[in-house]
Image (cartoon, grey):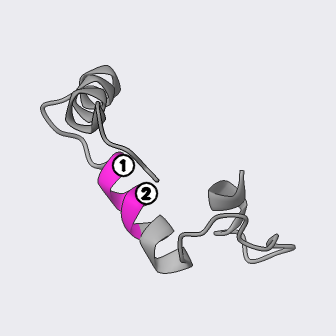
Amino acid sequence: MYTARSESRKDTPENPTNVGDGMLRLIKIILARSGQYSYVNLAEIFIQQTQGISYK
Protein backbone atom coordinates (compact mmCIF):
# COMPACT_ATOMS: atom_id res chain seq x y z
CA MET A 1 0.00 0.00 0.00
CA TYR A 2 2.85 2.37 0.82
CA THR A 3 4.56 1.88 -2.52
CA ALA A 4 1.32 2.49 -4.41
CA ARG A 5 0.58 5.69 -2.52
CA SER A 6 4.14 6.98 -2.46
CA GLU A 7 3.91 8.03 -6.10
CA SER A 8 0.84 10.22 -5.64
CA ARG A 9 2.75 12.86 -3.64
CA LYS A 10 -0.50 13.61 -1.74
CA ASP A 11 -0.84 12.40 1.83
CA THR A 12 2.12 10.04 1.46
CA PRO A 13 2.36 7.94 4.62
CA GLU A 14 5.66 7.40 6.40
CA ASN A 15 7.72 4.55 4.97
CA PRO A 16 6.86 1.53 7.17
CA THR A 17 9.79 -0.59 5.97
CA ASN A 18 13.46 -0.75 6.83
CA VAL A 19 14.18 -0.28 3.13
CA GLY A 20 14.80 3.20 1.78
CA ASP A 21 12.58 4.84 -0.83
CA GLY A 22 15.30 4.48 -3.48
CA MET A 23 15.47 0.73 -2.94
CA LEU A 24 11.67 0.47 -3.10
CA ARG A 25 11.71 2.29 -6.46
CA LEU A 26 14.36 -0.13 -7.74
CA ILE A 27 12.32 -3.14 -6.59
CA LYS A 28 9.25 -1.75 -8.37
CA ILE A 29 11.24 -1.28 -11.60
CA ILE A 30 12.57 -4.82 -11.46
CA LEU A 31 9.15 -6.30 -10.76
CA ALA A 32 7.49 -4.25 -13.49
CA ARG A 33 9.87 -5.51 -16.19
CA SER A 34 8.40 -8.13 -18.41
CA GLY A 35 10.69 -11.02 -19.06
CA GLN A 36 10.82 -14.71 -19.69
CA TYR A 37 9.73 -15.60 -16.15
CA SER A 38 6.24 -15.30 -14.71
CA TYR A 39 5.65 -14.17 -11.14
CA VAL A 40 5.07 -17.81 -10.19
CA ASN A 41 8.44 -18.80 -11.68
CA LEU A 42 10.20 -15.91 -9.96
CA ALA A 43 8.60 -16.87 -6.63
CA GLU A 44 9.74 -20.47 -7.03
CA ILE A 45 13.28 -19.34 -7.89
CA PHE A 46 13.31 -17.08 -4.85
CA ILE A 47 12.17 -19.90 -2.57
CA GLN A 48 14.81 -22.26 -3.96
CA GLN A 49 17.59 -19.70 -3.55
CA THR A 50 16.64 -18.73 -0.01
CA GLN A 51 15.89 -22.11 1.55
CA GLY A 52 18.11 -22.85 4.50
CA ILE A 53 19.19 -19.24 4.95
CA SER A 54 19.04 -18.04 8.54
CA TYR A 55 18.04 -14.41 9.03
CA LYS A 56 19.46 -14.25 12.56
Q: Is residue 3 left or right of residue 54?
A: right
Residue lying farthest to the front in this orientation? 56
Q: What SS does tag 2 mark?
A: helix
Of residues 3 and 43, which is closer to you in this image? 43
Q: Which mark is residue 28?
A: 2
| Quadrant of the rendered image containing residue 3 | bottom right
Q: Label 2: how many residues lie within 10 Å, few (<14), some (14-19) or many (20+)? A: few
Q: Which residues are magenta?
A: 26-32
- Within-10-Å neighbours for mark 1: few <14, some 14–19, many 20+: few
Residue in the image at 21% along x and 36% along y: 49
The residues bearing labels 2 and 1 have C-alpha atoms spaced at a distance of: 6 Å
Residue at image point 71% right, 71% down? 15
Q: For the residue marked with disc 1, what is the amino acid? A: Ala
Q: Nearer the viewer, residue 12 or 15?
A: 15
* Position of residue 14 measured from the top left corner of the image (x, y, whole percent): 79, 74
Vertical placement of residue 48 versus 26, above or below:
above
Image height of 32 relative to 10, above or below:
above
Please state which amino acid type lies under the numbered disc 2: Lys
Q: Residue at x 17, y 38 (%)?
A: 35
Which x, y percent locates residue 23?
A: 43, 72
Kindly state the secondary structure of the residue where label 1 is placed: helix
Looking at the image, which residue is at 64% across and 64% down?
A: 17
User: What x and y, as percent, mark residue 53?
Assistant: 31, 41
> Per the image, is 28 magenta?
yes
Q: Are marks 2 and 1 in contact (CB under 8 Å)?
A: yes
Location of residue 32 in the rendering, given as x and y in whole percent from the top left corner: 36, 49
Mark 1, residue position: 32
